[in-house]
Image (cartoon, helix red, strand yellow):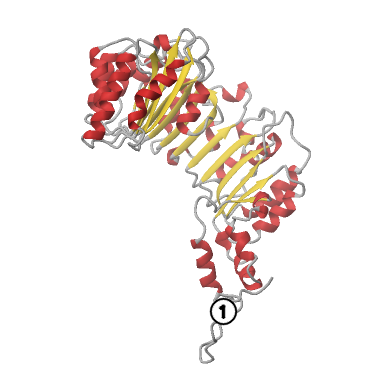
């Protein structure tokens, strides 16, 4: 590589001054170079994906290694530059290449991931199961802190069946998702990994278990993990509501939970559970019937801060029962709430209860996504104005309002304009995003233009305004889009 000549052209060289190295920093000690390299990494570029990151010109490790031979040696001999590795299993010879990269982080607290590019109908023949387990997982069992696997079904089964002698003493987070079709048929007694992860705090599962395994269980064998110390739990396969309530009782330290529930086929007659430590809960229901009663009768969330109530088909109506749940069984620290619907006709049927909800939670709310009722109700319009003005919710940063029915929603639009004017004029609140959804029965191309024209006066107010217009007969099936636009992802 050509040297870096740092002399300034046309300037006489001072003979008494020390010579500047042609390769700057070549004489720095390795520990100083390592510290410099670490400072150049952040959360956005710390993860190294094999082999994808080798070709990235903006990856600091790749750039540093090309400066000079000494820098290259320092990069390769700094373990903490290589302690967050993801193996792309679709790539040929990935096991050998992965071993080579992982050898750069001996003894480091390791975050290891392995993934396929997408779900497949059958497990690929390469890489081999034995090579993956024996050459990647087992040699690093004692240094793993995080293990995230989206791998073919046989790989998942092999990881679960690792014998007790393979210990993971430092593993705190485990994510197991199968990337090919398969169902675990063996009994829980064959799952050896259960007793070998004594310090696990986080568990994410997307696995398919046979029905006999689920009987008397919660969606997977009970003895797979130490429940009492778990702080984060995610299960992407549907489980019975009763089993979810059992999880909350098993996990007194649980702070974050993402769960998918089976359809409630009858009123949920089981004891209420109080999740004292739970701060973040995202539930995806499979059907809207009995959901509000399940929440009201079965859950008490005194520490909740982030709550998302999702439903797979049409979303949830805001009812008085949901308002009662949020008002009476959720603590006074709620910051983020998501309740969405794609049915304009039932989006909001409990305006009085909504006011009670605001009385309790308005002062702490930062993000609010609600299916606004379409009927005209003086109390509802007043609450809407207070929300937008910052007078009621001074910390509200993001607000999404659904189910404006055009043209009868003109009163709502007028109220929004008044509220935004007040927050700007009196410098109340910190609102930075406003999402609005308008529904109509017949073709009405002028709606978006009309709303945009009305909101034009706020274009310089540092408030991002998003407007979507839907035909009320064609909105079905857009829940995933709405959810992704709000959260930035859809699971």
As drawn, which residue projects farthest toward the right? 125
| Residue found at the far bottom of this picture | 16
Across and down, in percent, residue 402 comes to 40, 19
Find numbered disc 1 in the image and state the secondary structure of the residue it sits on: loop
Residue in view at x 32 percent, y 36 percent: 461
**Mark 1 neighbour class, 10 Å CA radius: few under 14, some 14 to 19, many 20 or more:** few
Image-based side of 103 in relation to 432, left or right: right
User: Picture coordinates of residue 150 (x, y %)?
Assistant: 63, 38
Is 84 situated left or right of 413 in this image? right
Name the spot of residue 388 as percent of width and height, x first: 28, 28
Q: Is residue 331 visible?
A: yes
Q: Quadrant of the C terminus?
A: top right
- The residue that disc 1 covers is 7
- Which residue does the image show at 69% across and 51% down from the upper left? 51
Residue 219 x %, y % = 54, 26
Image: 313 above or below 174: above
């Amino acid at each position: 590589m050509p040297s870096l000549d740092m002399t300034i052209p046309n300037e006489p060289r001072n003979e008494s001054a020390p010579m500047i190295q042609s390769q700057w920093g070549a004489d720095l000690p390795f520990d100083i170079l390592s510290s410099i390299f670490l400072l150049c990494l952040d959360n956005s570029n710390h993860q190294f994906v094999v082999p994808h990151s080798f070709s990235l010109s903006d990856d600091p490790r790749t750039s540093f290694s090309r400066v000079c031979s000494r820098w290259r040696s320092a990069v390769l001999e700094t373990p903490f530059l290589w302690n967050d590795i993801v193996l792309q299993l679709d790539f040929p010879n990935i096991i050998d290449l992965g071993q080579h990269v992982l050898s750069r982080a001996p003894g480091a607290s390791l975050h290891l991931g392995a993934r396929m590019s997408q779900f497949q109908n059958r497990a690929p023949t390469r890489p081999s199961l034995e090579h993956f387990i024996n050459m990647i997982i087992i040699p690093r069992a004692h240094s793993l802190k995080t293990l995230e696997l989206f791998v073919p079904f046989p790989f998942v089964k092999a990881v679960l069946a690792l014998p007790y002698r393979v210990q993971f003493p430092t593993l705190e987070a485990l994510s197991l998702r199968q990337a090919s079709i398969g169902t675990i048929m063996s009994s829980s007694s064959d799952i050896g990994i259960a007793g070998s992860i004594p310090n696990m705090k986080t568990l994410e599962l997307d696995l398919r278990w046979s029905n006999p395994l689920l009987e008397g269980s919660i969606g997977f064998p009970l003895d797979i993990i130490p429940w009492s110390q778990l702080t984060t739990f995610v299960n992407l396969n549907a489980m019975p509501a009763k089993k979810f309530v059992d999880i909350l009782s098993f996990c007194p330290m649980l702070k974050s939970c993402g769960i998918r529930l089976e359809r409630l086929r009858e009123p949920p007659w089981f004891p209420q559970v109080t999740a004292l430590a739970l701060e973040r809960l995202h539930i995806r229901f499979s059907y809207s019937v009995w959901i509000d009663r399940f929440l009201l009768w079965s859950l008490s969330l005194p520490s909740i801060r982030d709550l998302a109530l999702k439903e797979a088909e049409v979303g949830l109506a805001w009812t008085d029962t949901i308002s009662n749940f949020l008002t009476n069984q959720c603590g006074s620290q709620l910051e983020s709430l998501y309740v969405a619907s794609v049915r304009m006709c039932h989006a909001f049927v409990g305006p009085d209860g909504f006011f009670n909800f605001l009385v309790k939670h308005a002062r702490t709310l930062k993000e609010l996504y609600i299916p606004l009722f379409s009927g005209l109700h003086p109390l509802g319009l007043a609450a809407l104005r207070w929300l937008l003005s910052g007078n009621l919710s001074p910390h509200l940063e993001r607000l999404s309002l659904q189910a404006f029915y055009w043209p009868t929603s003109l009163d709502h639009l007028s109220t929004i304009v008044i509220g935004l004017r007040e927050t700007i004029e009196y410098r109340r609140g910190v609102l930075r995003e406003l999402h609005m959804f308008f529904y109509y029965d017949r073709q009405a191309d002028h709606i978006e233009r009309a709303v945009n024209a009305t909101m034009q006066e706020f274009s310089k107010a540092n408030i991002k305004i998003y407007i979507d217009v839907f035909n009320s007969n064609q909105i079905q099936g857009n829940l995933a889009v709405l959810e992704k636009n709000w959260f930035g992802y859809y699971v």
